[in-house]
Image (cartoon, rainbow, N blue to C red):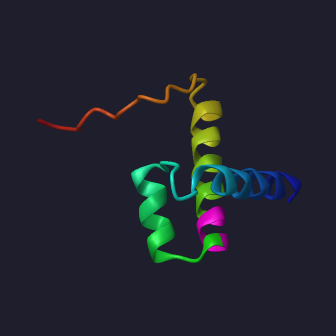
Amino acid sequence: MYLRTLLIHGARALLRVRTGPHRAATPWLAGLLARRPRNMAAVALAHKNARIVWALLAHECEYHDKYRPQPVGG
């Protein structure tokens, strides 16, 4: 429960700092903020961050911000 709180506080801090009129947010976050209230966007961002952390721990990988998954099949 405490980890959830920390993730949400971190997401709220990011929203406060990175989503001003002259600050660029990611396209995903900008679209989310256009569709949802700010607190719901913070929880969604925290959830996304939690999934990333879980995947890194489960697969014993390092985080790469430019990573793009390869298409499956061909």
26 over 21 or under it: above or below:
above
24 over 37 or under it: above or below:
above
What is the quadrant of the C terminus in the image?
top left
The picture quadrant where one finds residue 9 is bottom right
Counting from the top left corner in percent of width and height, residue 21 is at 52, 59
Counting from the top left corner in percent of width and height, residue 42 is at 65, 63
Taking the image as shown, residue 45 lies to the left or right of residue 25, namely right
Counting from the top left corner in percent of width and height, residue 40 is at 62, 72
Q: Residue at x 74, y 58 (%)?
A: 8
Name of the residue lying farthest toward the left? 74
Q: Nearer the viewer, residue 29 or 48?
A: 29
Q: For the image shown, how many numbered marks are present on the structure?
A: 0
- Magenta residues span 39-43
Mainly helix, strand or loop, the magenta region?
helix
Q: Residue at x 59, y 32 (%)?
A: 56
What is the quadrant of the N terminus in the image?
bottom right
Q: Nearer the viewer, residue 53 or 31?
A: 31
Taking the image as shown, residue 55 lies to the left or right of residue 30, namely right
**Any magenta on residue 30?**
no
Q: Residue at x 43, y 55 (%)?
A: 28
Taking the image as shown, residue 40 lies to the left or right of residue 72, namely right
Q: Residue at x 45, y 72 (%)?
A: 34
Counting from the top left corner in percent of width and height, residue 22 is at 51, 52
Name of the residue lying farthest toward the front? 22
Taking the image as shown, residue 49 lies to the left or right of residue 32, namely right
